[in-house]
Amino acid sequence: MFPILETDRLVLREITREDVEGIFDCFSNIDVTRFYGQDTLESIEQAEKFVDFFSKNYNEKRGIRWGIERKGTKGIIGTIGFNAWLPKHKRAEIGYEIHPEHWRKGYTSEAVSKVLSYGFDIMSLNRIGAVVFIDNEASNNLLLKIGFQKEGVLRDYMYQNGVAYDTYVYSLLKNSK
């Protein structure tokens, strides 16, 4: 059964077909995708494929992606989760995005903190990594504030609209949280 996580203001829950419009609202917004390494969605069918991908990833134990929903409000405002999950090596990478209408309200750090705890305590991860575009100041600052260590630069690591970008690579270890 898909785990549901709660914080003071949020419910992190399974992403379903009912969330296709919410996925489209996020991933069709250039402000969301410009640092994502993902082309901006142009159709609802592309959003449906995202939902299917998240579900398949979870079923095949390669990742887990929650929809971020505000308590008392129906519909997701973003997603968060782990990709590149390798249980044997006790590691995964965290990724997240939130619709710009909800930026600078503390929702992302609230969700990240809960998901990190879940990763270390329930999934038995030892290392949680993150790969972030160098120009993504908000995400870079958030990870450092939470305690991630910057490990270096991955040169020409992500492509966005056909252009290669350098990224920072971060990690947080279980014994350092």
Image (cartoon, rainbow, N blue to C red):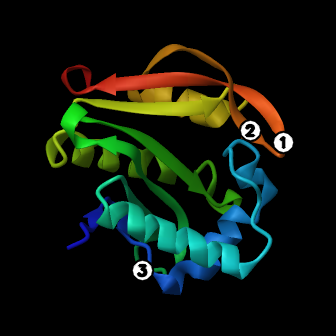
Name the residue type under label 3.
Answer: Gly
Residue 72 is labelled as 3
- The residue singled out by tag 2 in the image is 159
Which residue is more in the foreground, 146 or 21? 21
Query: Picture coordinates of residue 146 (x, y %)?
Result: 41, 30
- The residue singled out by tag 1 in the image is 162
Image: 1 above or below 134: below
- Cα separation, mark 1 vs mark 2, equals 6 Å
Image: 169 above or below 66: above
- Cα separation, mark 2 vs mark 3, equals 37 Å
Instruction: Sort mark 1 into few (<14), some (14-19) or many (20+) by Cα contacts within 10 Å.
Output: few
Horizontal side of residue 99 vs 122, given as left or right = right
Mark 3 vs mark 1, foreground winner is 1
Residue 22 visible = no
Mark 2 vs mark 3, foreground winner is 2
Residue 59 visible = yes
Instruction: Sort mark 2 into few (<14), some (14-19) or many (20+) by Cα contacts within 10 Å.
Output: some
